[in-house]
Amino acid sequence: MAATAAPEIAPALNSDGDDLTLVINGSRLSGWSAIEVTRGIEQMPSTFIIEATDANPNLRDALNVQDGTPCTVFLGPDRVVTGYVDTVIRSYSGGAHVVQIQGRGKCQDLVDCSAEWKGFQISGSNAFSIAQKLCEPYGITAQLLGDPGPTVQQFNLNIGETPATIIEKVTRQAQLLYFEDPNGNLVLSKAGIDRAASGVMEGGNVQQASTIRSQAGRYSDYTVSLLGLYTDGTITSDVAFPFTARDPNVKRHRKVYNIEDQVYGGGLLAAATAIWRSARMAGRGERVVAIVDSWRDAAGKLWTPNTLVPVSLPRLQVKGETLCLSRVTYRFDLSAGRTSELELMPKSAFLPEPLQLQPLIPGAIGPPTSARAPTK
């Protein structure tokens, strides 16, 4: 493993193609025995695990890495993680030294730490502006890809809540995903906003693949009713506005009832939640996991979460589908070389659960009559 003093700039590709470079304390460390870097739209922060052994020429450099140190991880010229070293494991066995370095992106502080907000009350802000303010104390910025959603008129924070917990609530109302980008900053985005230059193709780049088709947790009918709450926490007298969404691919009768505990006046939420449950569970029931022979697509771009990827695996009964890349793990070891594990599902699997943070005006609180399912 070579260490050289250098500013934090993207390293050049070496003669063997991509390599992982850990930029730390002004030095670039490369030549690792094994690596694993994971990014996804359902995990925050991004993570990395890298390992050096006596086979590496400069094991001493890795042994000197200290936990808590800021760092940046590159794959070839592309930054993938900006964050901190969390854990360093040094071991000695049978005459061999091994050092393993584990770290996470900067957004770990949004997940681990408590939210800082003067007065603990949010007023007149949307999901994006709220996220920006929650990120500031931890040196993180927020980026919006899409519409910021409705204005949150008033929302009280609980002391001790993490920024990520609050961001989850406000992004649900805005129907946005939230995840970490390669710079360690927060992204708010709709699902599947970009497309990969190539896909997962049987007989092409696929080394191993599996499909998971499951009806576990799926129902033929999802009936949702709203249990209204006034802002003082008082439960209203009616369980209102039952709405049923159906999954036509569940052939036998399987019905489930859910009651949403939401603010008063959220009748539209019953319909939205029923439709969401049906679509999400159907999407979750069609998952593809594939190991491909490169970290990059045909255009040389790293496989990137939240991109749409064409998938053709005829032997697994997947023909010409376009799925959303939810998680990618870049790996390297001396036996398998460079591979990427891709987890893909339909876009509907990532629709955020509907949420309403403020009460609506009574008299305009239910779904249209034509949208209501008949009761039995």
Image: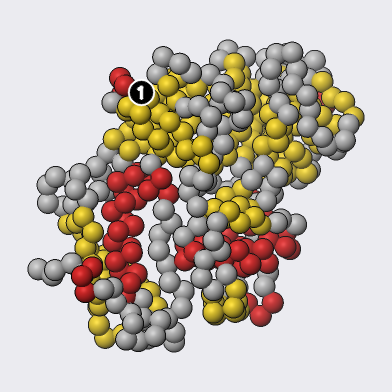
Image quarter hosting the N terminus: top right
Specify the quadrant that holds the C terminus: bottom left
Instruction: Tell me the residue at 14%/68% (across/down).
Output: 374
Compared with 218, 89 (above or below) is above
Query: What residue is shown at x 40% (from left), y 23% (from top)?
Result: 209
Taking depth in this image into account, of 122 and 306 the one nearest to the observer is 306
Q: Is residue 110 left or right of residue 326?
A: right
- 184 and 27: which is toward the camera: 184
Residue pictured at 31% horizontal, 41% vertical: 285
Residue 158 appears in the picture as rendered: no
Q: Quadrant of residue 52?
A: top right
The local crowd at label 1, few if under 14, some if 14 to 19, many if 20 or more residues have their Cα within 10 Å, is: many
Q: Residue 119: x, y in percent?
A: 66, 80
- Residue at 35% x, 86% y is 362
Residue 236: x and y in percent read: 31, 85
Between 88 and 24, which is closer to the camera in this rendering? 24
Residue 242 position (above or below residue 254): below
Left or right: where does residue 56 sit relative to residue 321? right
Total marks shown come to 1
- The amino acid type found where label 1 is placed reads Leu
Residue 276 position in % (x across, y down) = 34, 57
**Snapshot quadrant of residue 213:** top left
Is residue 125 rendered to the left or right of residue 356? right
Please name the residue that numbered disc 1 is placed on: 313
Task: Please say if 372 is above or below 233.
Answer: above
Q: Position of residue 324 (x, y in %)?
A: 45, 40
